[in-house]
Image (cartoon, coloured by chain):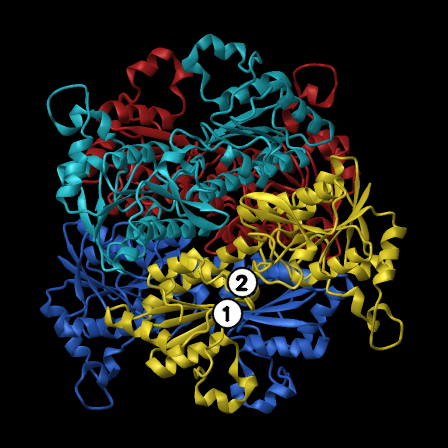
Chain colours: A blue, B red, C yellow, D cyan
Amino acid sequence: MRIAVNTGGGDAPGLNAVIRAVVLSALSRGWETFGIRRGYRGLLSGEGVIPLGRDEVRGITHLGGTILGTTNRGDPFRWVAEDIATGTGGEVDRADDVIAAFQARGFDGLVAIGGEGSLHIAHRLWRKGLPVVGVPKTIDNDVCGTEQTFGFDSAVSTATEAIDKLHSTAESHDRVMVIELMGRNAGWIALHSGISATADVILIPEIPFDIDKVCDKIRLRESRGRRFSMVVVAEGATPKGGTPVLIERRKAGGADRLGGIGNQVADAIAERTGKETRCLVLGHLQRGGTPTTFDRLLALRFGSAAVRAVADGEFGCMVGLAAQSIVRVPLDEIEGRTKRVPLDNDTLATARDLEISLGD
Amino acid sequence: MRIAVNTGGGDAPGLNAVIRAVVLSALSRGWETFGIRRGYRGLLSGEGVIPLGRDEVRGITHLGGTILGTTNRGDPFRWVAEDIATGTGGEVDRADDVIAAFQARGFDGLVAIGGEGSLHIAHRLWRKGLPVVGVPKTIDNDVCGTEQTFGFDSAVSTATEAIDKLHSTAESHDRVMVIELMGRNAGWIALHSGISATADVILIPEIPFDIDKVCDKIRLRESRGRRFSMVVVAEGATPKGGTPVLIERRKAGGADRLGGIGNQVADAIAERTGKETRCLVLGHLQRGGTPTTFDRLLALRFGSAAVRAVADGEFGCMVGLAAQSIVRVPLDEIEGRTKRVPLDNDTLATARDLEISLGD
Amino acid sequence: MRIAVNTGGGDAPGLNAVIRAVVLSALSRGWETFGIRRGYRGLLSGEGVIPLGRDEVRGITHLGGTILGTTNRGDPFRWVAEDIATGTGGEVDRADDVIAAFQARGFDGLVAIGGEGSLHIAHRLWRKGLPVVGVPKTIDNDVCGTEQTFGFDSAVSTATEAIDKLHSTAESHDRVMVIELMGRNAGWIALHSGISATADVILIPEIPFDIDKVCDKIRLRESRGRRFSMVVVAEGATPKGGTPVLIERRKAGGADRLGGIGNQVADAIAERTGKETRCLVLGHLQRGGTPTTFDRLLALRFGSAAVRAVADGEFGCMVGLAAQSIVRVPLDEIEGRTKRVPLDNDTLATARDLEISLGD
Amino acid sequence: MRIAVNTGGGDAPGLNAVIRAVVLSALSRGWETFGIRRGYRGLLSGEGVIPLGRDEVRGITHLGGTILGTTNRGDPFRWVAEDIATGTGGEVDRADDVIAAFQARGFDGLVAIGGEGSLHIAHRLWRKGLPVVGVPKTIDNDVCGTEQTFGFDSAVSTATEAIDKLHSTAESHDRVMVIELMGRNAGWIALHSGISATADVILIPEIPFDIDKVCDKIRLRESRGRRFSMVVVAEGATPKGGTPVLIERRKAGGADRLGGIGNQVADAIAERTGKETRCLVLGHLQRGGTPTTFDRLLALRFGSAAVRAVADGEFGCMVGLAAQSIVRVPLDEIEGRTKRVPLDNDTLATARDLEISLGD
């Protein structure tokens, strides 16, 4: 048996652990593994196909990034011509070519590591006949079909540590500190790290916020002698309809002047409360670095389980975590769905019990 | 409403987070909370009862240890006389006195944070009428009724980091390094940290080991040019019946000379393979320190959920984690049971796929 | 003896360790210590004077922030009227009042922890008769008279860890990553963390940079198959006279549009090389959090040494580190001086040996 | 120019950083570098000589261990015959052969990274004509001629973190915790980590201890309501002449039963104070793992400075740190000397000011 493994989308702590587990699990069955660098483009051109053995995956479990180099961003169904030097413009569908290249290599299965977009592509390729097993990857934790994705625990840890650090500075300077975290569609990172690091306000996409409620919380703390506040904002947080968030000065500058939601919230707080307010956008710091122990293990389990699925001839599925065990979830089932924080989630209840304002 | 909170058994990262969540969750309902220092003894004498408010629990989420000081180790059903200065010897049953003291204080509920032993006591007190809600605490992760206990993720992280550190030294010195981890009845810590830190051998109580299989693995690595090996041993690991583990020299010294299982395994490996072998017993390092982000959040959720159970008048239960949500589990159900690593666990399958020897 | 301790300027990891060492060192001599909250304002009004004993400084060595709360920012020589509610506008000189308040309290010495600005104020107060011993504090490491300040090692560690994290993401995405670090007048943080985290370019205030040299380095790496680059920029870095850094689009927006030097450098690199380029401003993350072991120890040594200076009746000096020992440096000597990276520094030579571009 | 680099003695965090700096600094001068695996034996047999280029040293700065594999332990002046398969027993002097092998390879300089023993060998080889530059390496920090060695800061950090972790457990269990740290001849690690982690007692080789003084300190704390204590013991600590440390029970067992000094001290404390006392021997955890930022930078500076010394034709010296700068120290000067903690060291004064007992 010969299997291939590729990675799509952004960086996530644990990618190398998945790859290592795939290679060793295949080896222990006497199979060969090939990594596909630069995604489907590397497969098509053939230049990206590299054999992966014991030596190639030694000592990489805890390393950030991916030994496959750049992660894949091309969509074979909507191939941008310049990528393949056809000289013609526009998008073309190269899916059949990708499958042909895969078969020409004699591959028996593809382990596709990726987030929502990459799994969607994998799903469509599978419908066209490619034997694929998906491994969910997103630091945002918003892929359906798995209770958790690898990379999420690491991102939450990084965010928690950052909020912790800003905490002491905010307190020493009597300041409001706004920290913008990743999470365009779902507020998992903001919610988990905000509670863990004892934020005072947490704003997530699932709960549209009222800036006045945010300011009320800050003033309440002030009245109790707590002259600083920590406000955590997911990048996808949005104000309630009709609630004016933005201050006039920024509005005047046009969309280009607004900055992200973190900066907008910081400006609005400063304007309304008169408190010195600063914003930090944590950005890519959440993506990189050494995976936590939890993520290392989850990534290794995912990689190993993906190979077991291949061994069972069960394709068109994704491995996932359910009640502490690895399950196989049909890609059909997760198509087009996003895992958002449910409003009856006990973690939200915990936040409220801890008197953290959710801006509502 | 007035509630009490106590902690029993050994230290675990996250204790303070539970306490903080209990206090704030109670406060947000307008309740009072009292901490019981020194366990049931402190309650009986009255000296251990201290009011806990916002100020007492400020900034403690990430601190190791417990603000309640010494954790409880006394069993009211088998009270050692000297503890209460009766002047008489032997054990007495003071359970009714404990309940009377509880009622005399006007408490409406007790949040009992503890491991198997402490939850057993709480269970018996509940059967006698004490309104109790349990919070499972053990770094070993062997309490039934919850997928995970707080403190476990921190212990696994500490162990993983330790194995990582020993790894580079083992490699630089061509050595076999044996590391003994906690886990008397269950091998969760050894299994999770051993895989995450890429150990070569993992020995757990659930799988009796054959020392010759362990040495075979070390020799196999040697034959591949890997002149060092990392062996992780849970303190409760035991050799297969009839398999001689101990070397003669130690046997001669009597039981007192044997040391823990880690030292025994190290000696046996050295004797059988001729390799320079060292053993490190990680011990209490696994118990202490700052909780990981995962444990902080789980502990806060547990504390908050325990107060919600009290608010619902649902006693005689324990809060637990199931499929990422907090559930309430009757204490009746967990009585006398230990959560061991099931042999069909996919994490074990992962270990085998990664060519880690489990000694069988 | 009664001594007072205050802190001025921004937050720095280690402040609490200094305070603890001052209190315990005084206690061991049978002295009393008083903390001054809110700086000289708190001393003048009397509201900020709080006794500090063993209990107040227990367990704070490794905590970020300061138990004295907000750090001092008022200058008694240029007192802003509203601070003291005189009802009159403008600045007044309240230095004599501060000294009178100090004497009225019966204080025998002041340990003033602060950066350049605070030490300057302490110096002037000493010249007017206040018995002061300074403790240098700045994460920037730019105070003269000491080889290192506490907080610097922690800031460098935080910055190094951040660059490490961005590294794997930059590599996975074929990106140029610009990270802006603190250091308005001196490039110590950028230089030390940039080398430790293997940056490709480091720009510091001491060496005006040529943006074309920066881009040359990025292109050289590209030609060697390294399609990503890490560029570390101190906030005080400046382009060589006449070298155009800023792209036209931004220039058009006016100064307000330029952002900090990090964003300017990122834009310029993107424009010149066509590479996808991102900038992260690390900001206050460098100020907060737990001090490293090095900073804990240095802070404790500084605090203890300051009390020994008071015991010797040696005032008007600052404690400092010289060749691993604590020395006393007259405040006269450091007045108006800034410790910048000397151009013949061997660390700069190391950077060049490691083929790190310094932009010159 | 062709240079060689080898490493001797135990593992130390930062070894790879030195090697990387040597290779890149050589490359930037157009030189070639060769690593010598397995020390002088690898050089003699020729099998250990491997070319090191940009690719071999990529991404290794922060990795523990050494890419050269096993560190060297053979002494060419006292060569054990079996090492070289002569078939004859006993020791022989192969120093001339080593130098001949070095010259036959066309090497122009050797960068020898090692502790006291390895530098001593390098020194003798230099006297016989080998062009050598030493780089001091010991986590114990006891090499003369340099204010600090790389690896020391990492070891202190690891030890500090361990004491921190044990602290919360000791406190929760009312226990005395003894932690034995490395430092056979000098107490640097114990002193620095003990102060940073707020130990109550620190015992170092430089100050013979009186076990009764240790117990007095524990009792004094008890009398103040602090029912736990942390005792840090360097492995080379010794009791004052005539002071009985060991309890009778152990003495009876003979030397083999005594365990290290940490266990002896723990037993003695338990016997004398009646307190529950535990001992943890931190051991190899202090040697391994990722170097701290400080050690990364120091190691890189050392490696780069060693190449500059070679470039200047200055051999027979060692690079060292003095007043924050790199200096060259003649190997003659450090021969036979050990850097112990001087008794007038201000860090010792700090310990006393913090009411830490030094056992005297």
Q: Secondary structure at mark 1?
A: loop
Category of crowding for the residue at label 2, using alpha-carbon neighbours closer than 10 angstroms: few (below 14), some (14–19), many (at least 20) = some
Name the residue carrying label 2.
C340
- Whether residue B141 is visible, yes or no, is yes
In the image, B269 versus C223, the foreground residue is C223
Q: Is D261 drawn above or below residue A24 in the view shown? A: above
Q: Secondary structure at mark 2?
A: loop
Front residue of this view, candidates C207 and D217: C207
Quadrant in which residue C47 is drawn: bottom right
- Residue drawn at 58 percent across, 63 percent down: A348
* Image x and y of residue D37, in percent: 22, 41
Inspect the image, locate mark 1, and give the three-letter code of the amino acid beneath it: Pro
Q: For marks 1 and 2, give the CA distance.
A: 9 Å
Q: In this rendering, is residue D279 above or below C255?
A: above
Q: What amino acid does circle 2 point to?
A: Arg
Relative to C71, D286 lies left or right: left
Sequence-wise first label, 1 or 2: 1
- Residue sticking out furthest to the top: D252
| Left or right of D33 on screen, residue C249 | right
Q: Are marks 1 and 2 in contact (CB under 8 Å)?
A: yes
Left or right: residue C21 compared with residue A97: right
Q: Residue B2: percent from the left, percent from the top? A: 75, 47
Q: Quadrant of the C terminus of chain A?
A: bottom right
Question: Is residue D222 positioned above or below A191 on the image?
Answer: above
Q: Nearer the viewer, residue A118 or D306?
A: D306
Q: Residue at x 36, y 37 (%)?
A: D331
Residue C39 at x, y percent in the picture: 76, 59
Q: Tell me which chain the residue with mark 2 is part of.
A: C
- Pointers 1 and 2 within a single chain: yes
Residue to which mark 1 is pinned:
C205
